[in-house]
Image: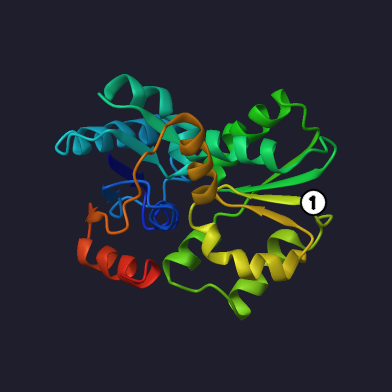
Amino acid sequence: MKVGVFDSGIGGLTVVKSLLEHQLFEEIIYFGDTARVPYGIKDKNTIIRYAIEAVEFFKNFKLDLIIVACNTVSAYALDEMRETSSCPVIGVVEAGILATKNSISDKDSNILILGTKATVKSKAYELGLSKLGFKNLQAKATGLLVPIVEEEIYSGEIINSTFEHYFKELTIPHAVILGCTHFPLLSDALQTYFGKETLLIHSGDAIVEQLEKEFVFKTKYKNPQLQFFASENPEALRNIAKKWLSL
C-alpha cells in the first residue's frame, strides 16, 4: 500500500514514526505545509481550503490512503477532504477517540485534552468522547508548545515554564490526549510533569490502532520508500525527518 501523510508542519513525522515501527506501508509520502504553519490559529474556511489543496497535491501519487496527521484539519476539514479525494481519508481525531475508548474503561476518569486553539474550539474530542459516555473532560489550548517543538526544544526550563503556565491550576488527570502531533515529542517531559500514573494517548499509536482495526495488512514492509515534501524549505523538513526517524 502507498499512503500519504499530511500535516501543517513537521509534527506529523511522529505519525510517520509509528507507521514505520509497525511496518504497515510499502511507500509513505509526507507533505508538510510548512509555509503556512501553524493552522491552529486560522479560521475554519482557511483550514478547509488548505486541506483541499493538500488533497490536490496527493493526486500526483495514486495513493491508497491519506492520513491527516494534523488534529486541526481532522477536526474541521475531514469531510471536505473525503469529498475531494479518490482514496480513503482518515484523521487523528477519530483515531484518538478510538484509542481513548480502548484504553480507559472508567467513564468517570478525568481526561485532559491538549490541542491548538482551533482544535479545542471545535470541541471535536469532547463531542466524540461524550457520545461514548465519558463525563469528566477538560480541553486546554496549548498553542505555545507548537513553535517550541518546531524549534526542537523538548525539555528544560522553557518547557517546564510553559507547562506551569498552562497546567499549574489543573487537577492531575488520569489521561492526557496529545491532540496535536507535535506533542508526542514532549511525552517524556509531560510524563515527568503529570506523573507516571497519568496515561498519555499518542496520535501516531492511535492511528496504527485504527488502521489495524479497519484494514487487513498481510505484509510487513521493513524498508519502505519514503518521500518528504514541504511547501517551504523542504530540505529542512528532510533533515528533521532524518533526525526524528533515525534515517
Instruction: Give the farthest residue toward the bottom.
Output: 157
Amino acid of disc 1: His
* Quadrant in the picture for the C terminus: bottom left
Q: Residue at x 64, y 28 (%)?
A: 128
Q: Where is 121 relative to 235, above or below?
A: above
Q: Where is 57 relative to 173, above or below?
A: above
Residue 88 is situated, as x and y percent measured from the top left of the image, at: 34, 27
Q: Residue at x 36, y 34 (%)?
A: 46
User: Residue 96 appears in which quarter of the rendering?
Assistant: top right
Residue 27 is situated, as x and y percent measured from the top left of the image, at: 25, 48
Circle 1 packing at 10 Å, graded few (<14), some (14-19), many (20+), is some
User: Residue 34 appears in which quarter of the rendering?
Assistant: bottom left
Residue 182 is situated, as x and y percent measured from the top left of the image, at: 49, 57
Under tag 1, what secondary structure? loop
Q: Nearer the viewer, residue 212 or 131?
A: 212
- Tell me if I can see residue 4 in this picture: yes
Residue occupied by mark 1: 174
Tally of numbered discs: 1
78 relative position to 128: left or right: left
Instruction: Give the farthest residue toward the top.
Output: 83
124 relative position to 17: left or right: right
Instruction: Give the farthest residue toward the front.
Output: 218
Q: Residue at x 54, y 37 (%)?
A: 95
* Quadrant in the picture for the N terminus: top left
Residue 238 is situated, as x and y percent measured from the top left of the image, at: 26, 65
- Tell me if I can see residue 144 in this picture: no
148 relative position to 67: left or right: right
